[in-house]
Image (spheres, rainbow, N blue to C red):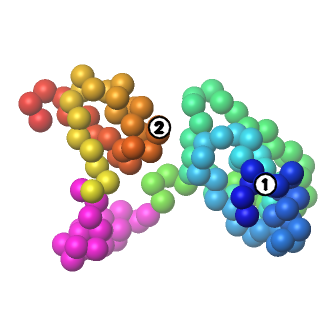
Amino acid sequence: MNPKEVDDVVDRIRELTGGVDYALETTGVPAVAEQATDTLTQFGTLGIIGAPPLGTRASYDVNDHISGGRSITGIVQGDPDPQQFTPDLIELYRQGKFPFDELVTYCGFEDIEQAVEDSESGETIKPVLRVGDA
């Protein structure tokens, strides 16, 4: 479904699914997060990954969440168990199955504005700033 071709995305999702048990918000756009909560079934959970600019807020009907048993959960870096996850990632990298170095772009600190632009546009997945001779 292309949301640009639908009058009301929430209504269309509810029409197709009856509501969803889980939704994942990755954009950081408050209006999208609000729509995602509206697609939830009773006891549904919304996972929030996307972060809007500081001070930006989304609005939710608290009573709707309480009466429907709905949850909103913030997710930080996937919430992994680092004692298990880090060695697993290292092993995947060694096997050539997780080429994280292809996700990283290094740049000098003097190029910070370009790094931000590239990150926001999707040109760069993970800009890493180097300070000094690093």
In the image, residue 32 sits, relative to residue 120, either above or below, namely below
Left or right position of 81 against 62: left
Q: Residue at x 83, y 67 (%)?
A: 19
The stretch of residues the image draws in magenta is 80-101
> Compared with residue 48, is residue 115 higher up or lower down, i.e. above or below?
above
* Secondary structure category for the residue under label 1: helix
| Residue type, mark 2 in image | Glu
The quadrant in which the N terminus is found is bottom right
Q: Is residue 42 left or right of residue 86?
A: right
Q: How much space separates mark 2 and mark 1, taking CA atoms?
A: 25 Å
Q: Which residue is mark 1?
A: 5
Quarter location, residue 103: bottom left
**Is residue 69 positioned above or below 84 on the image?**
above
Q: Quadrant of residue 123?
A: top left
Closest to the observer: 17 or 55?
17
Residue 51 placed where, x, y %? 57, 41
Main secondary structure type of the part rendered in magenta: helix
**Residue occupied by mark 2:** 120
Determine the residue positioned at 71% across, 47% down.
33
The residue at the point 70 percent across, 33 percent down is 57
